[in-house]
Image: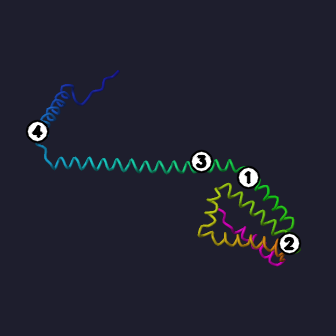
Amino acid sequence: MKKYDSYLSDSDRTSMFNGLFSKITKKEDTHNPSHKDLSDDSEEKGLITSYADKLKDGFFSSLTKTRSVLAQSQDQMNASMNFAKNLPYIILLLVAGSFFLMIALFYLPAILIWPSKFSFSFAIASICFLSAIALVRDPKTFLRSLLKAEKIKYSAAYAISLVGTFYFSMVSRSFVFSLVFAIAQVTLNLHLPVN
């Protein structure tokens, strides 16, 4: 193995360390604790306090960050467990919605003759599909998203069109209003922002 040359010889290093050691020991002799300045003492305490405060603030901020991350992961875990628990109901609602949508499309050519049959079937299909979406997402989250300020107009109009559809197709059996609410319901389904 090749030995590397150093800048300082062994004797130079020894004398340098001896000189540093003697300077350190002389400083300790001159700075006796009984002769300490009060300003130095308060300065050291101020530094220690500020470092302790910074350490404490950093610890508590990392602790709150950790708690928020844990809360988010727990919410995601609960949502995935709810999805797994609600999966059979979601599939059932999608199948029922598809069935009622096929019936509504079957009555679509005869909408001018029997608008109540189309509007009733389409309303049931929409309710099934929206319920499935609400179960995929959390139902509370889904309702909160529908009641946001930018979506409240569409949500209210859609609810009114559903109630009107059921009332005029089942109770009063009005041809004209059943047709009007069926058209309103289809239009609002196209414009209802679900996200």
- Mark with earlier residue (1, 3): 3
* Quadrant in the rendering for residue 27: top left
- Mark with earlier residue (2, 3): 3
For residue 77, which numbered disc appears in the image?
3
Alpha carbon separation for disc pair 2 and 1: 31 Å
Where is residue 143? Give x, y as percent: 64, 62
For residue 30, which numbered disc appears in the image?
4
Q: Verify CB contact (< 8 Å) between mark 2 and mark 1.
A: no
* The N terminus, quarter of image: top left
At label 2, the amino acid type is Ile
Alpha carbon separation for disc pair 4 and 2: 105 Å
- Callout 3: helix, strand or loop? helix
- Mark with earlier residue (4, 3): 4
Where is residue 108? Give x, y as percent: 85, 68
Q: Is residue 61 left or right of residue 68?
A: left
Magenta region, residue range: 175-195
Q: Nearer the viewer, mark 4 or mark 3?
A: 3
Alpha carbon separation for disc pair 2 and 3: 46 Å
Residue at numbered disc 1: 89
Alpha carbon separation for disc pair 4 and 1: 84 Å
Q: Nearer the viewer, mark 2 or mark 1?
A: 1
- Mark with earlier residue (4, 2): 4
Alpha carbon separation for disc pair 1 and 3: 19 Å
Q: Verify CB contact (< 8 Å) between mark 4 and mark 3.
A: no
Q: Residue at x 83, y 61 (%)?
A: 102
- Callout 1: helix, strand or loop? helix
